[in-house]
Amino acid sequence: MLSFDVQYQWQSFEAHYQGQLAVGVTSILGASGCGKSTLLSLLGGYVVGQGSIDFAGQDLSLEPPFERPITTLFQSDNLFPQLSVWDNVAIGMCASRSLSSAQKEKVTWALEQVQLSDCHAKYPDQLSGGQAQRVAIARVLVRDKPILLLDEPFSALDPKLRSDMLALIGRLTQTYQWTTVMVTHSPADAVLLGGQILLIENGQIVAQADAKKLYDSAPESPFCDYLSISSAP
């Protein structure tokens, strides 16, 4: 269980997030500027707030980002253009890429999981957008962290490819029992990914729902107002 009660202030923006996230997928919805990515940044340690972030009996708020049991996948795939696909995955385990035999096998295994074994010697400029994102996901696999944060990593992909990437994240989350948290502007993507959905307004979590029941939200639910906004032309 990932539990948090954390506050953050920057200029005129004030946020206070309280929640508990179970193993599985949780998507975060909300209008632009409401504080969705700020919550991810607080969980990952990329910005500093006040309060607690607890996971498996450990207060993560006391740890620097590189020591938290977290991997973050941003909108950019963050691949190194001068490195091959294999090396871009290997660097997730060791910056020098001097790997043991077991670690090398793990890189090969991760590329198999995302169906990129045949691309191991290619460079990022030789990959499609979907292939590049799958390399980034392979890097997530070798890092083997129990928490995965996704900040709209697939928003630039075409609809079919985005659906494929979401399905892959869903399968990997279930297989490896990750706690996966994804920020998105798309209710459809959140429903496709499944799990739970949080709604953020003005720096606070104001509602939570099962993804399967999102479009059945009661008229008085904050989700109902949000969906009307998000579907407006």
Image (tube, rainbow, N blue to C red):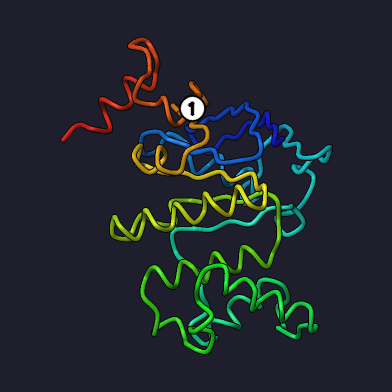
Q: Residue furthest left?
A: 233
Residue 211's spot in the image, x, y percent?
45, 31
Location of the N terminus by quadrant is top right
Residue 49's spot in the image, x, y percent?
66, 38
Question: What is the crowding at mark 1: few (fewer than 14 residues within 10 Å), some, or many (at least 20)?
Answer: some
Residue at image mark 1: 210
Is residue 155 placed above or below 118 in the rendered structure? above
Q: Is residue 34 left or right of residue 179?
A: left
Q: Amino acid at mark 1?
A: Asp
Q: Is residue 232 left or right of residue 9?
A: left
**Which is nearer the eye, 188 or 43?**
188
Which residue is painted at 72% across and 81% down in the image? 104
Is residue 44 placed above or below 9 in the rendered structure? below
Residue 207's spot in the image, x, y percent?
48, 21
Which residue is painted at 71% across and 79% down in the image? 105
Residue 233's spot in the image, x, y percent?
15, 36
Which residue is painted at 55% across and 30% down in the image? 15
Q: Is residue 204 left or right of residue 191?
A: right
